[in-house]
Amino acid sequence: MYFSVNHGEWANKVSMQLEECLARGVKVRLMVDSFGLALDQPRNALNNRLLLQDLEEEGVEVCVFDPKGHRLNRMNRMHMKVCAVDDTFAFIGGSNIGDNYLEWSDHNLSVVGSLGPVFHDVYDYIERFTGLASAKRLNLSQLFADDAQVWLTVPKQRRDIRRALLGLILNAEREVSIRSWYFVPDAEIMDALHSQATAGVDVKILLSDKTKIRLVDYANPIIAEELTKAGVGVYRYTARFMHAKAAWNDKGDVLFGSANIDGKALGSNFECSIAVRSQQLAGDLRNAFYSDCNGARLHKAGDFSNRSLTSRTLAQLAKLATPWL
């Protein structure tokens, strides 16, 4: 399940591997969001469709995701990035299948063990929102891949990733670290970050200085200013793009997956994240965080007020629009 598959070297290599799986008698299913096929890399839109057509002709069960029914609309996109192999391996994280993601700072996680059919069941469950499959009943509060809990955002129904993120923030005693491509948190998440920082918890956030959505870029400086005044360390990644979506705390609680910290990811997209307690993984993420801070700029109190009047006005207007981003 991928938001986008973009024509190029990486997509061709993945396609070849899928065709080899088919030759061995493996059942192969691929779900790609229809908006992602055109919006992620617009110049590849036609070639992306042709790539999926070729895979379907080879025997891949291709599902181009377009939401239907269930009170959904065209803004409710499938933004997941998950590859599951049998019941023993899964690959989950921030990267879609496209050459541009090889040039960005991103995080993806290999999950190996007795995972069971959970990710295949999630595929069946999400597919029903396209109107192409019968309903798949799942207890969304009891989805586990071995000892990792799988959380979903399901538009109009579930906001479990948001709830897990709030719990991770509020359960921290000494440290909370977050990295997110889009960072436009709602009031409750902002309050949680504020309260933890003012209580002496070391709260650090790494966001991309530039994204592909200009409104997000305009709004982020004023959000960063508010958090900085509360004692949060906000780092703006300036070396290319920073596309990762991960959060962890000092207890080793880790939330990892496809969801950015914005209204769409936590409320109106289909998203998938896993929650696991692992001090080793938290340590690896912490090391990567500090490494990427070498390509980042720390936001300082007063940085926003030093901007031009035009920049400050755009930021205020963009912040008003963030609930609809």
Image (cartoon, rainbow, N blue to C red):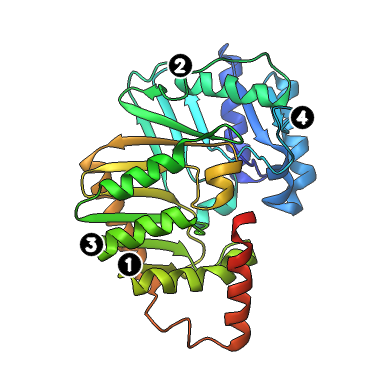
Sequence-wise, which precedes: disc 1 or disc 3?
3
Q: Is residue 114 left or right of residue 17?
A: left
Q: Residue at x 54, y 51 (%)?
A: 101
Circles 1 and 4, Cβ within 8 Å, touching? The answer is no
Q: Residues within 10 Å of mark 2 (few under 14, many from 20)?
A: some
- Report which residue position mark 1 lands on: 232
Q: Residue at x 58, y 11 (%)?
A: 25
> Which quadrant would residue 231 be assigned to in this image?
bottom left
- Report which residue position mark 2 lands on: 117
Mark in front: 4 vs 3: 3
State the SS at label 3. loop
Q: Amino acid at mark 4?
A: Gln
State the CA–CA distance, disc 2 to disc 4. 27 Å
> Which quadrant would residue 112 be assigned to in this image?
top left
Q: Amino acid at mark 2?
A: Pro
State the SS at label 1. loop
Q: Residues within 10 Å of mark 3 (few under 14, many from 20)?
A: few
Mark in front: 2 vs 1: 1
Sequence-wise, which precedes: disc 1 or disc 4?
4
